[in-house]
Structure formats: C-alpha cells, structure tokens
Image (cartoon, coloured by chain):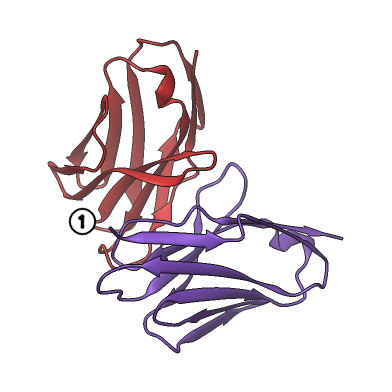
Chain colours: A red, B purple
Amino acid sequence: SQTIHQWPATLVQPVGSPLSLECTVEGTSNPNLYWYRQAAGRGLQLLFYSVGIGQISSEVPQNLSASRPQDRQFILSSKKLLLSDSGFYLCAWSARVAQPQHFGDGTRLSIL
Amino acid sequence: EDQVTQSPEALRLQEGESSSLNCSYTVSGLRGLFWYRQDPGKGPEFLFTLYSAGEEKEKERLKATLTKKESFLHITAPKPEDSATYLCAPRGNLIFGKGTKLSVKP
C-alpha cells in the first residue's frame, strides 16, 4: 500500500532563517506531488505541484520554492522566511490530477 | 474563475441529529467531485468520489450526492466521532472549499 511521510511535524523558526520541509511517498511510481498551505479561515492554498522529476509548477508568487530531486521526494524550501509564512503545510500525492489526493500529516510552521 | 463554496462554515449538532452540508461550485467542465474529512492537526482524508450528476455514495453515517451545481454530504444520526472538518474539491481542479467544521455533542 502507498504511504506518505512528511517531516518535521512542528517547526519554530526565526524570521529570515532558511526552510526545508521534506515529503516522501512509498508504494507508487511517478506520482503527482503537491504542496499546500492551510491558514485558519482561508482553506487549502495550492503552492506547488509536480507531475515528474524536475517539473515544478508554481501557483502562488512568494518567497518559497519547491524541488523534486527524486521520483517520490518533494521538498519545500525558502532562503529567508517571513512572518507571513507561518501556517500548516501539507504534502499530498495522487496517481493523476483527476484522482483523489492523499495527504501527509502536515508541518505546523511558526515564525518568530 | 473557478470557485467552490461550502456552507455552513460551522455546524453544531446533538448526537443523533441528522443534517446536511453543502458544497456549491462554479467550475467549467466539472468532471466530478471529491469529499474529504480533516481531523484537527492532520491532513485531509479522502472519503468519496462522485463522478456525475445523480450519483450517490455512502459510508457508514455519511451519504454524498451530486447535482450539476452542488453536492450535499448528508449525515444521519451522527456520533461525536464524526466531528471533523469536511472539505469538498472538484475533480481535476486542484482547488478546495474552505470546509464545514462539524461538531457533534453527546
């Protein structure tokens, strides 16, 4: 069966520090991968999605970036965090865009 | 612009009190809809796929229905463990509604 791992579960970072969140999927090949941010009252906001290694689509202009160095690995990064980057970050995968997504347990990011 | 609206934003029920959640959308070329359940501090968990208008899906106390413009998630005789936020998402669109937070009190 397929599983998705996302870490860390919680993270507290100072403003201006770098960020790296990692997500890996097991039990499937060539998945579509997604990064979302969920803020209170604003729902799930799609940040990036990838249909293959090295293929990244950005949905929202911001100081975040994503990379997919391996088929089942998706990384969310920032060189300098802003206060507005605080939130709940979720990684997800699906077999295709028209298939349901399966989410990790998320990372709660607090910027001080 | 494609939009998804869920109502109500929050719903408080007594155990056993049936009700419905609504998901309405303006999406060009709708090809179905997903429903998810999200527990606090967790990622959403997939519940149902509805592919076309008129389709219904059931799982325990939940029944999802779909028309051309909206979907309903009916909850029959809910229990406290049904408390969660329920999200809907048009199939193939990568957007989600903001969800309905359901609280069921014993």
Picture coordinates of residue B25, whole percent (x, y): 40, 67
Q: What residue is shown with label 1?
A: A30
The residue lying at 35 percent from left, 39 percent from top is A23
From the image, which quarter does the N terminus of chain A lie in? bottom left
Mark 1 residue type: Asn
| Side of A69 where B59 appears, left or right | right
The relative height of residue A75 versus residue B15 in the rendered view (above or below) is above
The residue at the far bottom in this view is B54
Asked where in the image residue B19 lies, by quadrant, the reply is: bottom right
Which residue shows up at 37% across the image and 50% down it?
Answer: A92
Percent position (x, y) of residue B34?
43, 68
**Nearest to the observer: residue A6 or residue A91:** A91
Q: Residue B70 at x, y = what percent? A: 46, 75
Classify A109 as above or below B56: above
Residue at position x 24%, y 43% in the image: A59
User: Which of the two residues, B41 or A28, is positioned nearer the viewer here?
Assistant: B41
User: Which of the 4 image quarters holds residue A17?
Assistant: top left
Between A100 and B30, the one nearer to me in the picture = B30
| Numbered disc 1: secondary structure | loop
Asked if residue B87 can be seen in this view, the reply is no
Residue farthest left in this picture: A54
Q: Chain of mark 1?
A: A
Q: Position of residue A95 (x, y in %)?
A: 28, 63
Q: Is residue A26 above or below residue B15?
A: above
